[in-house]
Image (spheres, rainbow, N blue to C red):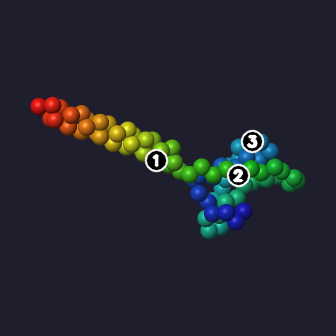
Amino acid sequence: MSIPYDNGWSAYVDGKKAKINKVVSNLMAIDLKKGHHNVILNYQVPGLKLGWLVSAIAVILFISFLLVVKSKDKLRNKL
């Protein structure tokens, strides 16, 4: 295949997970036996789940910070 090799790729041949090999100058290859096959390629961005988790935590912390600042301002205004 003329698709650049990347860790995010996974391949399924006839419904079974297949190993993707790195060949030539960074291209992907899958070992197949002679005949017709159903090949499915999937790409999952490496680090995507971790990125979403970090972003969600950052948003939660930011909202918490805003709530704390707002509550402190209310306390100062009462005094």
Between 61 and 43, the one nearer to me in the picture: 61
Along the horizontal axis of the image, is 24 left or right of 69?
Answer: right
| Mark number, residue 16 | 3
Query: Residue at left 67%, top 50%?
Result: 42
Label 1 amino acid?
Answer: Gly
| Mark number, residue 41 | 2
| Among the two numbered marks 2 and 3 on one chain, the one whose residue lies closer to the N terminus | 3
Check if mark 2's residue and mark 1's residue have beta carbons within 8 Å.
no
Disc 2 packing (10 Å; few <14; some 14–19; many ≥20): few
Q: Nearer the viewer, mark 2 or mark 1?
A: 1
SS for dot 2:
strand
Query: Residue at left 75%, top 54%?
Result: 31
Label 2 amino acid?
Answer: Leu
Residue with the mark numbered 1: 51
Q: Quadrant of the C terminus?
A: top left
Residue 74 occupies which quadrant of the picture?
A: top left
SS for dot 3:
strand
Between 53 and 64, the one nearer to me in the picture: 64
Residue 15 occupies which quadrant of the picture?
A: top right
**Residue 22 in view in this figure:** yes
Along the horizontal axis of the image, is 41 left or right of 50?
Answer: right
